[in-house]
Image (tube, helix red, strand yellow):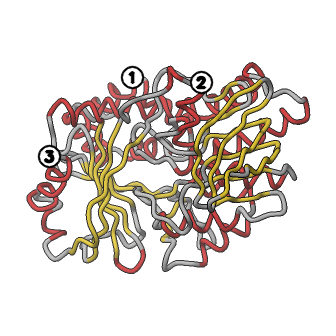
C-alpha cells in the first residue's frame, strides 16, 4: 500500500476545545498546521456543559464576533448569572457572578450542550492555515532528532506526517502523553462524573444559576443541576475515583437515590423525565504536584495535560486557555527555531501553571473541605448571616487574589467567629 508523506510545522491530535484553542491562535499567527481528529463532527462529549468566564475570555481574544453569536443564540446557549451552593444540612447560598451588572452587561458564563458547542468551535477552526482530517486513526507515533512522525489512517489512506511540533489535545486517555511522559501516565482517572439530561425539573433559578449540591448521600462528591435551553437540565455527580473504589459505590445508584429521596432535591424531580441514559466519563483533575506538560518537540493541552479544576470539575475554560498558551509558545519557538524541552518548559509549562496556580490551589483546598460536612454547613450558614462574608465569596469568583483566602486557616477562623 502506498503511503502519503506530509511535512508540517505543527501537528495537533484532537479537535475538541483544547485542540481548537491551539488552532485558533496558530491561524491568527499565520502558522500552518494539521489537525487529526478520531471522531466526525458533530459528536457528543459527556460533560457538565457549563462554560466559565475563562471560556468567554479566550474566545473574545480569538474573535469577539464569535461570542456575539453565542449571546444571540439564547435557545442553545443559556447565559448564567450566578451559582447556588447547597450545604449538607439543606441550607443554601446563591451568589451572583456580577452583582453590579447593568442592562448591557454580558453574562460571564453560559451552559450549552457539548454536542453543539464543540461543533461550533470545530467550524471556527476553518482557515487557510488549518487542514483537518476527521475520522482519522492514529496508528503510531515515532520520534527522531528534531522531528515527530505520526502514522495516520484516513479514509483508507496511510499518511506519515512529520512535524516539528506535536500537540496532544486528545483527552484524558491521551496517546501523546502515554508516548512521551511515562511518569505522567495514569491507569485510572483521578475522578469520575456522571451526566444525565432531564426535562421538567422544577425550582430552577430565573437567572439560570448553576447549582452545586453537597448532599449527605453524595459526599465527599457533589451533585450538580445546570439549567439548559428548552426546559432541559444537565444533572450529574462527581466524585474522586479513590472514594468510589474504596466504598465500592455504584455512582449511578447513589445519584438516583439522592434525586428521589433527598428532601431538598426529591420534590423537584417528582415529575421530571430522564432523557436518554446516564453517561459516565473520567475527569483528569489537576494535581498538587506540577507535572510536565511539554518536552522535546511536543506539548500537552486540556485534559491531556490534566488541567480539570479539582473542585468544580470544569475543564473547557482551562482547555481553551492552555490551547492559547500553547500557540503562543509555538510561535516563540518557531521564531527562535527552538522546540526543545527546556524552551517549552519555560515558554509553556511555567506560563500555564503560573496563570492557573492560585485558582487550582484554592480549588484543591475546597475539595478537601468537602470531606467535612460540618465545615460546608458552617460556611454557608455564616455567609447567609454575614454580608461581608458574602462579598468575600462573590469576589472569589472574579478575583484570584481574594480566592487565595480559601487556602488560609485565618479565613475559616474569621468565618467561624462571624467576623
In the rendered image, the residue lying farthest to the front is: 1
Q: Of marks 2 and 3, which one's residue comes earlier in the chain?
A: 3
Report the residue marked by disc 2: 292
Q: Residue 52 location, x and y as percent?
A: 52, 54
Q: Are marks 1 and 3 in contact (CB under 8 Å)?
A: no
Q: Residue 158 location, x and y as percent?
A: 67, 51
> Where residue 215 is drawn, which disc sits there?
none
Q: CA distance from mark 2 to mark 3?
A: 36 Å
Label 1, residues with CA under 10 Å away: few <14, some 14-19, many ≥20: few
Q: Quadrant of the C terminus?
A: top left
- Residue at 78 percent of width and 23 percent of height: 145
- Residue at 57 percent of width and 54 percent of height: 53
Q: CA distance from mark 1 to mark 3?
A: 30 Å
Q: Decide if residue 305 is on the left or right side of residue 62.
A: left
Report the residue marked by disc 3: 217
In this orientation, which residue lies closer to the viewer: 294 or 270? 294
Report the residue marked by disc 1: 410
In this orientation, which residue lies closer to the viewer: 55 or 375? 55
In this orientation, which residue lies closer to the viewer: 49 or 295? 295
Q: CA distance from mark 2 to mark 1?
A: 33 Å
Q: Secondary structure at mark 1?
A: helix
Q: Secondary structure at mark 3?
A: loop
Amino acid at each position: 500500500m502506498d503511503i502519503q508523506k506530509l511535512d508540517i510545522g505543527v501537528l495537533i491530535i484532537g479537535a475538541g476545545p483544547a485542540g481548537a484553542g491551539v488552532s485558533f491562535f496558530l491561524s491568527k499567527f499565520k502558522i500552518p498546521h494539521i489537525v487529526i481528529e478520531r471522531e466526525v463532527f458533530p459528536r457528543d462529549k459527556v460533560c457538565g456543559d457549563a462554560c466559565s468566564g475563562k471560556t468567554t475570555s479566550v474566545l473574545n481574544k480569538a474573535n469577539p464576533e464569535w461570542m456575539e453569536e453565542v449571546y444571540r443564540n439564547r435557545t442553545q446557549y443559556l447565559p448564567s448569572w450566578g451559582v447556588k451552593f447547597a450545604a449538607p444540612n439543606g441550607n443554601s447560598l446563591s451568589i451572583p457572578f456580577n452583582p453590579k451588572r447593568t442592562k448591557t452587561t454580558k453574562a460571564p458564563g453560559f451552559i450549552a450542550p457539548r454536542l453543539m458547542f464543540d461543533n461550533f468551535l470545530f467550524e471556527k477552526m476553518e482557515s487557510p492555515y488549518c487542514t483537518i482530517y476527521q475520522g482519522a486513526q492514529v496508528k503510531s507515533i515515532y520520534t527522531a532528532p528534531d522531528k515527530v512522525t505520526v502514522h495516520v489512517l484516513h479514509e483508507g489512506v496511510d499518511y506519515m506526517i512529520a512535524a516539528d511540533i506535536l500537540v496532544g489535545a486528545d483527552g484524558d486517555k491521551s496517546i501523546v502523553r502515554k508516548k512521551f511522559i511515562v511518569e505522567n501516565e495514569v491507569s485510572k482517572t483521578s475522578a469520575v462524573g456522571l451526566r444525565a439530561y432531564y426535562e421538567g425539573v422544577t425550582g430552577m433559578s430565573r437567572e439560570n444559576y448553576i447549582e452545586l449540591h453537597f448532599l449527605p448521600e453524595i459526599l465527599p462528591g457533589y451533585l450538580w443541576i445546570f439549567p439548559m435551553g428548552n426546559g432541559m437540565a444537565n444533572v450529574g455527580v462527581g466524585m474522586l475515583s479513590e472514594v468510589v473504589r474504596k466504598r465500592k459505590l455504584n455512582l449511578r445508584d447513589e445519584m438516583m437515590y439522592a434525586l428521589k429521596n433527598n428532601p431538598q432535591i426529591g420534590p423537584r424531580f417528582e415529575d421530571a423525565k430522564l432523557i436518554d441514559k446516564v453517561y459516565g466519563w473520567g475527569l483528569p483533575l489537576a494535581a498538587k504536584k506540577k507535572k510536565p506538560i511539554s518536552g522535546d518537540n511536543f506539548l500537552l493541552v486540556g485534559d491531556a495535560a490534566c488541567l480539570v479544576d479539582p473542585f468544580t470539575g470544569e475543564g473547557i475554560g482551562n482547555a481553551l486557555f492552555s490551547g492559547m498558551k500553547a500557540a503562543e509558545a509555538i510561535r516563540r519557538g518557531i521564531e527562535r527555531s527552538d522546540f526543545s524541552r527546556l524552551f517549552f518548559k519555560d515558554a509553556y509549562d511555567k506560563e500555564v501553571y503560573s496563570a492557573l496556580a492560585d485558582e487550582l490551589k484554592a480549588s484543591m483546598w475546597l475539595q478537601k473541605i468537602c470531606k467535612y460536612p460540618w465545615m460546608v454547613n458552617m460556611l454557608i450558614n455564616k455567609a447567609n448571616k454575614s454580608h461581608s462574608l458574602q462579598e468575600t465569596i462573590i469576589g472569589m469568583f472574579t478575583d484570584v487574589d481574594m480566592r487565595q483566602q480559601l487556602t488560609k486557616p485565618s479565613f475559616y477562623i474569621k468565618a467561624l467567629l462571624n467576623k
